[in-house]
Structures are given as structure tokens and as C-alpha cells.
Image: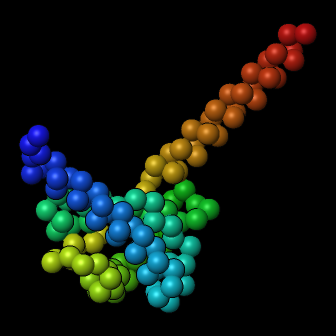
Amino acid sequence: MRIRASTMNFKRADRVAELIMTETSDIIFKQVRDPRVQTVTITSVKVTDDLRNAKIFFVEMGKDDCSPEMKAGLEKATSFVRRELGKRLQLRFVPEIMFVHDQSFGYGNRIDKLLADIARQGKEDDNRDY
């Protein structure tokens, strides 16, 4: 059985993305002292197949939107996080990292709220019929 190189790279990129996610969370939680980023949660990481770039998706706990302070804190911590990743990961090149706000959580919360409103309206309509 022959395995294509692109398939192997994709799997490696996924493994590296998981490592970056774990280590970035640890670095931010334990080593970054900026109070603006203490409520950040890393939700996922996407790494390019060549392992040169990584997008780190995050949310701010308890909020659907990202505050400007949080974004500024993460931008300031980017070089420190990348340097620490270089110390922890055994890679030839440490990917350039970019923090991106994960909007899917806010979108999911909005859908949950709309579904709850629809269910509540349905119960009210059922009570009126009797």
C-alpha cells in the first residue's frame, strides 16, 4: 500500500496543531502575566501543510465577542508565545503564529438562544389552545 506525501503531511500538521494548542494554552495560563489574556481559551489550531504558519483560534470566557484589550494583549504576547513554543516543540522551524477570534462560539450561542425562544413560544401557543 502506497501513502501519498500530502496525506502524511496533513496528518503531521494535525498532530503539530494539537501540540501547539496544548502548549499555547499552558504558556498563556502559566507564563504570560498580562491580565488582559487571563480569560482566554484556545479552541483550535490550524497549521499549514508545510508547518510554517499557524492560526490559533480563541474565545474570551463568558463573552461572544472579543474585547480590544484581549486582542491587544494577545498581539503583545505573540512573540513570547512563539519563542516558548520553540523551546517546547521539537520542530526544525517554529511556525509563525496568528491569534484569531473564534466566532463559532458566539454563533452557536445565538442559535441556542433562538431555539430556546422558539420552544418557549411553542409552549405558550400550546397553552392558549386549551
Rendered image coloring scheme: rainbow
How many numbered discs?
Answer: 0
Q: Quadrant of the N terminus?
A: top left
Q: Is residue 37 left or right of residue 63?
A: left
Q: Quadrant of the C terminus?
A: top right
Residue 4, compared with residue 57, is above or below; it is above
Name the spot of residue 11 as percent of width and height, x first: 24, 53
| Residue 39: quarter of image | bottom right
Point 28% across, 65% down: residue: 16
Q: Residue furthest front?
A: 1
Q: Residue furthest right?
A: 130
Q: Is residue 96 left or right of residue 115?
A: left
Point 43% across, 57% down: residue: 102
Point 46% across, 73% down: residue: 25
Q: Residue furthest top?
A: 130
Name the spot of residue 50 as percent of width and height, x first: 13, 62
| Residue 82: quarter of image | bottom left
Question: Can the viewer see residue 104 in this picture?
Answer: yes
| Residue 55: quarter of image | bottom left
Name the spot of residue 84 as percent of width and height, x first: 33, 85
Residue 122, compared with residue 2, is above or below; it is above
Point 20% across, 76% down: residue: 91
